[in-house]
Amino acid sequence: MFRFLGGCISRILGLLLLLIVLALGWFYRDELRSVWHSLHHPAPAAVSPEVAAAAAARLEEAFKRHGPERIALTQTELKSLLLYRWKTFLPDYVVRPDIQMNAGRIRLQASVPTDRFRGLRELQDVLSFLPDTAELAATGQFIPLARGRVALEVSEITAARIPVPQRLVPVILDNLGRRDEPGLAPNAVGLALPKGATAVFVSGDSLVFLHGMPSGKGGE
């Protein structure tokens, strides 16, 4: 009898506890939903010198190792590297550089003095609409070149959000220092891959390097 009563009481207490939990879940559903979202979708790390240092160390360590490897840098890591590690490689006249990635393409933008292009007759019509300093943005994708090199093929350039005619893209790239090389299209810029890397491409919002793979294998 006591065992029977004890079992009934345990079931009743368990049911009451379940009802209390369900009631609390209903009344505080918005707060619980917010907590659930924060646990499964943590806020991205902010652009910072610390993120740049960690990303640089991860790259350096990865390229020291032997064997195939896939190394992905997030958009936040790339922005941090661009601002705190790589900015010294940019010309002095380039300010507020930024980088974005989406759908297999990379978008680079920065503010550039428009007098850099005043001597180009082909751009005079475009320059007449621009202020002294304009936001210049280029969108493109990576194309394989010879071993150890890759091309950034530029599909679009905007100046102060005004699309530049496609025929003028090579003119702008040449003025920004593009150098011709075998297999390089007029609307593309040749870049050297990091030592040991065999390919680079954009996947989602990350820049992916393939390391240590034989030429012609890997990639997307």
Image (cartoon, rainbow, N blue to C red):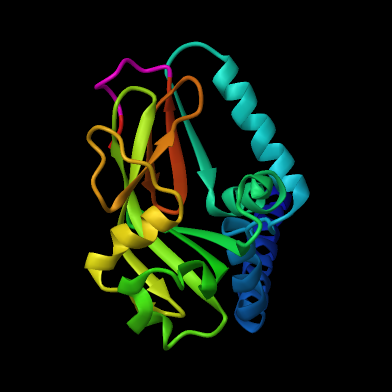
In this picture, residue 101 sits left or right of residue 75 = left
- 51 is higher (above) or lower (below) than 196: below
Residue 217 horizontal side relative to residue 172, left or right: left
Q: Is residue 30 above or below residue 156?
A: below
Secondary structure mostly seen in magenta is loop
Q: Does 50 appear above or below 100?
A: above
Q: In which quadrant of the rendered view does residue 209 lie? A: top left
Q: What is the span of residues highlighted in magenta in the rendered image?
A: 212-218
Residue at image position (45%, 55%) is: 176
- As drawn, the residue found furthest toward the bottom would be 129
Q: Is residue 169 visible?
A: yes
Of 53 and 145, the residue lying toward us: 145
> Residue 73's x, y, as percent?
53, 42
Quadrant the C terminus occupies: top left
Q: Is residue 213 highlighted in magenta?
A: yes
Q: Position of residue 131 (x, y in %)?
A: 53, 85
Side (left or right) of 22 relative to 205? right
* Residue at image point 29% right, 32% down: 145
Q: Is residue 193 magenta?
A: no
Question: Residue placed at 51% from the left, 67% from the top?
Answer: 116
Numbered disc total? 0
Is residue 155 something that shows in the picture?
A: no
